[in-house]
Image (tube, rainbow, N blue to C red):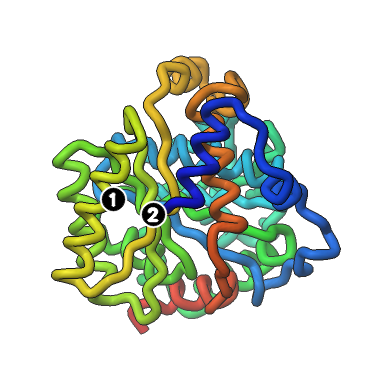
Amino acid sequence: MADQATRLRQLVGGSPLPEDIREEQMLSPQKRKTANSDNVRVIAITSGKGGVGKTNLSVNLAIALKEAGLRVLLIDADLGMANVDVVLGSLSRTHLLNLLEEGVELEDVLVHGPYGVDYISGGSGIEKAADFTFEERQRLMQKLTGCGQIADIILVDTGAGLGKNVMEFILAADEVLLVTTPEPTALTDAYAVMKAYSMYASAPSLKLVVNRVYDESESREVVAKLQQTSERFLHLPLECLGYIFEDPGVMKAVRSQKPFLVTNPSGTASRCIKGLASSVLYGSKMTVKKGWRGFLQQIFNFSH
């Protein structure tokens, strides 16, 4: 976590980044792969319990990645509690399951939201995906495949907890970001997710994000506890991708239905989210295992 800590200290303190890091944040199209269904990164963002700031983080991370030069698609898969629209101050009149309707195509459910964020609302009923007929699953997969052509990174904002749908999404994704806070209940629930994930993931790729910390030492404490527990009882390697400091500007942004990265781009939380985006892009070498097509195949054929 040393590299991430160094970057965040510089970002939060307002110090200029070293030349090599500044260069990293300027993405060159020549250095980026052309997106297709096989090389798009699919990252599921999840949490053990609600109220830890998962969706807020997802939206602001999407904006930060967009500002870094990537094509980002955010899929709201928080069933029953979908609120990407709320954080963005946007409105979606369609949702993913409208794709089952004759004549409805991907562009019809894709929302070109504010701040350059493209997203798809999950709506209600996606939890019944396993009960769809073969023809319905094929229709959804065929129409959703196009997402791999319009994005470099697809962020899937899942629900919280250990529901069947949540597990399906995180097991289908190539990478999983687990969001928690230092609260004991949040840590307990985060461990429950880690345990379930370690049992069923064929190729685990789990990274931790600690939200609402008051200082760096608090984050290190939280990470150390979870890492020790994970290694001892689950034999699951756990890397900390980053942390986000407590910032009163976040709640003000939520009340105004605007992302905090927009309302206060130089604020503490915004500096942290930019550091987090940098870690997503450059923190470690990541290889796509299944890609977007593989994600869809596992979701719509999960119980078959």
Which one is in front, 294 or 196?
Answer: 196
Question: In the figure, residue 193 lies in which quadrant?
Answer: bottom left
Task: Locate residue 17 relative to residue 164 in the image: left or right.
Answer: right
The answer to whether residue 78 is above or below residue 297 is above
Q: Is residue 97 visible?
A: yes
Say the numbered circle drawn on residue 223: 1
Q: In this figure, which residue is indicated by the disc labeled 2?
A: 240
Q: With respect to residue 280, does 134 lie above or below?
A: below
Residue at horizontal 57%, vertical 47%? 277
Q: Which mark is residue 252?
A: none
Coordinates of residue 23 in the picture (x, y in percent): 75, 49
Q: Mark 2 near mark 1, Cβ–Cβ under 8 Å?
A: yes
- Percent from the top left, x then y, of residue 95? 54, 48
| 229, above or below 26, in the image | below
The residue most toward the bottom is 304
Badge 1 amino acid: Val
Q: Residue at image x 59%, y 38%?
A: 93
Q: Could you say whether the residue bearing mark 2 is in a helix, strand or loop?
A: strand
Give the vertical position of 218 relative to 297 (above or below): above
Q: Position of residue 97 (x, y in %)?
A: 52, 56
**Label 2 amino acid?**
Cys
Q: Is residue 105 visible?
A: no
- Going from the N terminus, do you reach mark 2 or mark 1 first? 1
User: Which of these two is toward me, 43 or 130?
Assistant: 43
